[in-house]
Image: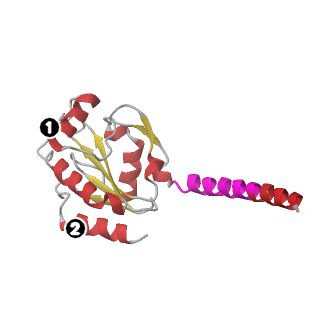
Amino acid sequence: MRLFHISFRISFRISFLISLFFVAGNAMAACPALLDRTMDTIHEKPQSLCEYAGKVVLVVNTASQCGYTPQYEGLETLYRKYKDRGLVVLGFPANDFGGQEPGSNKEISEFCVNQYAIDFPMFAKIDLKKNPLYAELSKATGSAPRWNFHKYLIDRSGRQVQSFDTKVEPTDRKLVAAIEKLLDSK
């Protein structure tokens, strides 16, 4: 009888480990191609965007010295309101339009925290025209950013992308409705 218990325990453990392997494999495979990349955070540390797989993602090119900079407040409000339901806002500082993001990553980070108490993930400053993520977002929507604070909304599967122009405020009913619709569909 004791031999049976030992054999059963070993068999159970092996089955458990095999199932963990398959679950982990499926989780890794679940990263959509759009997010399957690593980018530097505002603190210049590499981070996989696969971390956001399964979430509704709002991608925004930001700038600290732009007339639209106050949108940071609305973006943070959206993030705090909906993060527990699965929304993440990703900020990508860019100096592409009007030279309105001239600072270093450290200066941008300090500005975001001190002026707007930003808690959503911020990434290192990018060149929009050379950034592969933005190239794919532009291709998916047929709409490239024409100014700072252009927004791309990505569904949980990473396959559906919507584009929202700079002038669409983070609290705009159209954007909020689109976010809520994606959050409600699981």
15 part of magenta stretch: yes
Q: Mark 2 points at which residue?
A: 174
- The mark found on residue 143 in the picture is none
Q: Mark 1 points at which residue?
A: 65
Residue segment shown in magenta: 13-31
Q: Which of 135 and 168 is in front in this view?
A: 168
Question: Measuring 25% from the left and 35% from the top, which residue is drawn there?
Answer: 109
Secondary structure mostly seen in magenta is helix
Q: Is tag 2's residue or tag 1's residue first in the polypeptide sequence? A: 1
Instruction: Indicate left or right for 25 with 151 as reference.
Output: right
127 part of magenta stretch: no
Question: Measuring 70% from the left and 53% from the top, which residue is drawn there?
Answer: 17
Question: Measuring 87% from the left and 61% from the top, which residue is drawn there?
Answer: 4
Question: Measuring 20% from the left and 57% from the top, which residue is drawn there?
Answer: 170
Kind of residue at disc 2: Lys
> Residue 171 location in percent, x, y?
18, 61
Instruction: Indicate left or right for 79 with 26 as reference.
Output: left
Kind of residue at disc 1: Gln
> Residue 94 location in percent, x, y?
27, 38
Q: Is residue 179 above or below residue 110?
A: below
Q: Which of 16 and 67 is in front in this view?
A: 16
Q: How crowded is mark 2: few (under 14 residues within 10 Å), some or many (20 or more)?
A: few
Furthest residue toward front: 2
